[in-house]
Each structure stands twice: as C-alpha cells, then as structure tokens.
Image (tube, rainbow, N blue to C red):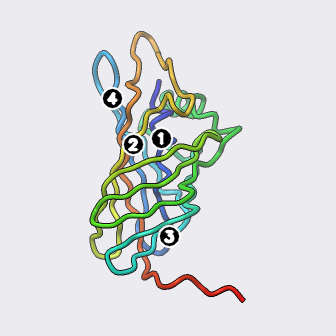
C-alpha cells in the first residue's frame, strides 16, 4: 500500500546507547491508517543551553516495518529503497520547542519544521511531510490510497553540545 512514503520521512532519528526510533503515521483513504516504524537510525542531537542541533542523522529505509508483510513490500517499492536505502536529516536547529531543518529522501532535499521536547536524555520531535514533494504519489492498492501528508514522531538521544571546535 502507500505506507512507504510516510516511512521515508523518518529521518529525524538518532543512535547511541539510548533509544532511538521513528514512527510515521499514515492515513488511508477512504478510511483507516497505519504506522511505519524503525529503530535503525544513526547520529546524535546536541543540546546547548536552550538550543538543539543535529546533522547527518541517517535512517535505514529498508528497515521500516508496518506490521503487514505485503504493505512492507509496497512501502519499499514506493520508497525505492534499492536505489535510496537511506533518508538523511542533513541539518536541523531548534529553540523553545520549535525547530527547522533540511531532510533528504529519495535524493530530494526539502526544508522541514516541527516541534520538539526534551525528556531526560531523549529529544522527541513531531513534524509533517508531504509525500508527493518527495516523488511519492498516486499510491493505491485495491481502491485504498494514502493521504499526502504524513506525521512523523521521532525519538533520538541527546548529548551535551558545546562550542564548535576551532579550526587550526
């Protein structure tokens, strides 16, 4: 089905010794919904004072699962995971619970924005993506399609950030 494009948006994930995950909420039309999930995410988010930043957070798109084998297969097909096995949060910054950044899915870079909160050693972020902006559109299986807008929920570990290293 169309769960594929939603999963691609999961780029906000991060790795470390803490939990990291991406969950994509996909709404089906005419009715229903599902979640695409992965915990195969690499990178870190940094916190410095009341600001956060992240760069080069990489998500393994081949690892997205929806709980239904056929839907997983369709998701991989629409996300073209053989050609584009990863999605990347190129960079992001935030302050006061709101953030912006740039994400790359299927070789296409787009600006994103969303909200976040820090709970302990985790950054929990929420944002929406328009799947058709990443070339993921016209998804339909047996009369059921997906909505263009998908919601991403990301949990990534945070580390203390400091001043950038000085160049010599």
Residue 7 is marked as: 1
* 164 sits to left or right of 24: right
Relative to 165, residue 36 above or below = above
Q: Residues within 10 Å of mark 2 (few under 14, many from 20)?
A: many
The secondary structure type at the circle numbered 3 is loop
Q: Are marks 2 and 1 in contact (CB under 8 Å)?
A: yes
Q: Position of residue 39 (x, y in %)?
A: 47, 56
| Mark pair 2, 1: CA separation | 6 Å
The secondary structure type at the circle numbered 4 is strand
* 140 sits to left or right of 150: right
| Mark pair 4, 2: CA separation | 10 Å
Who comes first in sequence, dot 4 or dot 3?
4
Q: Residues within 10 Å of mark 4 (few under 14, many from 20)?
A: many
Q: Residues within 10 Å of mark 1 (few under 14, many from 20)?
A: many
The residue beneath circle 3 is 44
Who comes first in sequence, dot 1 or dot 3?
1
Quarter location, residue 68: top left
Q: Nearer the viewer, mark 1 or mark 3?
A: 3
Q: Are marks 1 and 3 in contact (CB under 8 Å)?
A: no
Q: Are marks 4 and 2 in contact (CB under 8 Å)?
A: no
Residue 24 is marked as: 2
Q: Position of residue 8 (x, y in %)?
A: 51, 41
Q: Position of residue 65 (x, y in %)?
A: 47, 42
Q: Residues within 10 Å of mark 3 (few under 14, many from 20)?
A: many
| Mark pair 1, 3: CA separation | 20 Å
The secondary structure type at the circle numbered 2 is strand
The residue beneath circle 4 is 27
Q: Are marks 1 and 4 in contact (CB under 8 Å)?
A: no
| Mark pair 4, 3: CA separation | 29 Å
Residue drawn at point x = 47 percent, y = 24 percent? 1
């Amino acid at each position: 089905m169309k769960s594929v494009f939603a999963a691609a948006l999961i780029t906000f994930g991060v790795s470390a010794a803490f939990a990291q995950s991406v969950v994509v909420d996909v709404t089906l039309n005419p009715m229903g919904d599902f979640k695409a999930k992965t915990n195969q995410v690499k990178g870190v988010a940094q916190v410095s004072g009341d600001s956060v930043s992240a760069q080069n957070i990489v998500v393994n798109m081949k690892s997205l699962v929806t709980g239904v084998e056929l839907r997983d297969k369709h998701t991989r097909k629409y996300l073209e995971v053989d050609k584009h096995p990863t999605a990347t949060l190129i960079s992001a910054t935030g302050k006061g619970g709101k953030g912006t950044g740039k994400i790359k899915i299927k070789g296409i870079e787009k600006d994103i924005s969303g909200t976040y909160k820090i709970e302990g050693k985790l950054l929990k972020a929420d944002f929406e993506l328009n799947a058709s902006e990443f070339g993921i559109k016209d998804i339909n299986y047996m009369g059921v399609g997906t909505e263009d807008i998908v919601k991403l929920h990301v949990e990534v570990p945070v580390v203390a950030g400091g001043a950038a290293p000085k160049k010599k």
